[in-house]
Image (cartoon, helix red, strand yellow):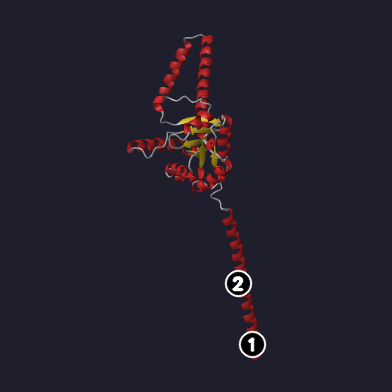
Amino acid sequence: MHYDKMLQAIQNIFSKFDKCQQKQMLISFIFLILIGIWILFLCYYSKQNRINRKKLILIGPSGVGKTKLFNIATDKKVYRKQINEDQFYEFPIGNNLDLVDTPSIEFDDSITKREAIIKQFNSYFKLNFYQIEKFYLIVNFERTDIMKKNCLKVYKYFKKFSSIIDIVITNFQLSEDEIKDKENLVKAFRMFVNDQKKVHFIRDDIQSEELKQIFIQSSNLIDLQDINFEMTKNREINKNEQNQTQQIVNGKQYQSIHECQMNQEENLIQIL
């Protein structure tokens, strides 16, 4: 009933216009529908694009060069509001990857400050949990024991993400012997990462494109640390050995049974 009344009302409205005007109104109506469909498509595409983008997250305490690295990689194209320094900043660096600068982690500060930081990280992780590709723990080049201590302060809060954490050592131009220091630091940081490719050394004069490539290439590394090929190989060998042993045992059992049957038959023949 309501549908019929609505249709009748529309017909009455159209009847007030001549055919030329009706045609123009129909074209306008179709055009508006097409615009609506296009807007919906753009919204859907934008949402899907956001979902499919992967996040490379910089973490670390203040003063380690975290924001400086972000600014170099982004050519300082991200505008920062002074009143909102403690927030997350994202910037696309290519290959469907977003580099993310985070608030400085100062968990040794007051309880209020610590809770505020944790709340910020929790909110961001809940929103982007499935898009997180890699964490980069930033630390300044200095005495090895101090570097390990500073890393541990942050690492302990992200330990569950250990398989996707890389360590980035900034200000490496301060090294007097880069080759030796690289070897020593790779060994020193094995308590955090067990692959030397997951430790990156950054000089202060690094260029934007070079830095972006470091992030892009390291994010594409396949993490095989949970796959122990040696254990798998040994497990297969042990399994084969067990099968062979079982076959031998079964063969001996069969041979023993066969010999027993033969002896019984011979005894029976002798008795007969």
Q: Amino acid at mark 2?
A: Val
- Across and down, in percent, residue 88 comes to 44, 31
Compared with residue 39, is residue 119 higher up or lower down, i.e. above or below? below
Q: Position of residue 177 (x, y in %)?
A: 57, 41
Which quadrant is home to the C terminus?
A: bottom right
- Residue at image mark 1: 267
Q: Is residue 70 positioned above or below 252 on the image?
A: above
Tell me if label 2 and label 1 are in contact, CB under 8 Å.
Answer: no
* Quarter of the picture holding the N terminus: top left
- Please name the residue shown 49% across and 48% down the image: 191
Which residue occupies 47% across, 31% down? 67
Residue denoted by label 2: 249
Q: Quadrant of residue 80?
A: top left
At x 59%, y 55%, the residue is 230
Residue 44 shows up from this direction: no
Q: Position of residue 242 (x, y in %)?
A: 59, 65
Residue 229 visible, this orientation:
yes
Name the amino acid, label 1. Answer: Asn
Tell me where residue 47 appears, x and y as whole percent.
50, 30
Q: Quadrant of residue 95?
A: top right
Q: Is residue 88 left or right of residue 182?
A: left
Mark closer to the observer (2, 1):
2
Q: Closer to the N terminus: mark 2 or mark 1? A: 2
Give whichever of 30, 54 is nearer the camera: 54
